[in-house]
Image (cartoon, grey):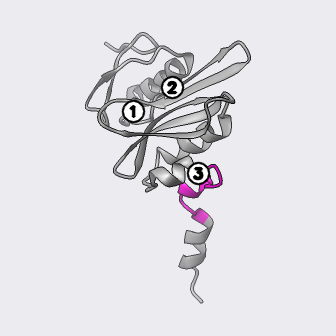
Amino acid sequence: MYAIGDVAARWHPEHGRRIRVEHHDTARRHGQDLARTLLGEPKPFTEQHWFWSWQYEHNLQSLGQFVGEGERVVRGSVEERSFSVFSLVDGQITAMVALNRPRDVMQTRKAMGVPHVVTAAQLADEAFPLKSLLPRKAAAARSEVPA
């Protein structure tokens, strides 16, 4: 028996517990995951939870789970209603919530899926490119080419 969708709690190996996210994106991804399982290709569901909502003219997005003792880091301007708040644990972004910062969300969503190290000062600095946390595939490919 399987239960999927935004009403189903799923085991998340990184969090060590069941988590339920009430958002259509989660429901869609659960369907894809169940299809792999039924076809004999099970894969742990390790993606960080993400949801978004429009609240009047403001876009609110959240990634991961704000649990534990993570350091909270603000990037942007709360006064101008354009900011992101990160949870940082041992140099790893474990969660974020953003108001009117879709680029921060897009780049952080990718970074949370790969090993990375970042400091609170870097996250707070808007001149620091979040995309620099992503692996450099082109650089890795060039280093493998014999001279």
**Residue type indicated by callout 1:** Phe
Query: Counting other residues with Cα less than 10 Å from the Cα at mark 3, is it few (<14), some (14-19), or many (20 or more)?
Result: few
Residue ranking furthest to the front: 79
Residue position marked by numbered label 2 in the rendering: 29
On the rendered structure, is 60 left or right of 112?
right
Disc 1 target residue: 45
Give the SS element for disc 2. helix
What residue appears at the point 29 percent right and 33 percent down from the top-left corner? Answer: 68
3 or 2: tag closer to the N-terminus: 2
Q: Are marks 3 and 2 in contact (CB under 8 Å)?
A: no
Which percent across, then down, holds residue 74? 52, 39
Q: Residue at x 62, y 54 (%)?
A: 129
Left or right: 21, with 138 as reference point: left
Q: Which residues, given as a range, are shown in magenta?
A: 126-137
Q: Amino acid at mark 2?
A: Arg
* Residue appearing at x 74%, y 17% in the figure: 57
Q: Position of residue 137 (x, y in %)?
A: 58, 63
Q: Which residue is mark 3?
A: 125
Q: CA distance from mark 1 to mark 2?
A: 9 Å
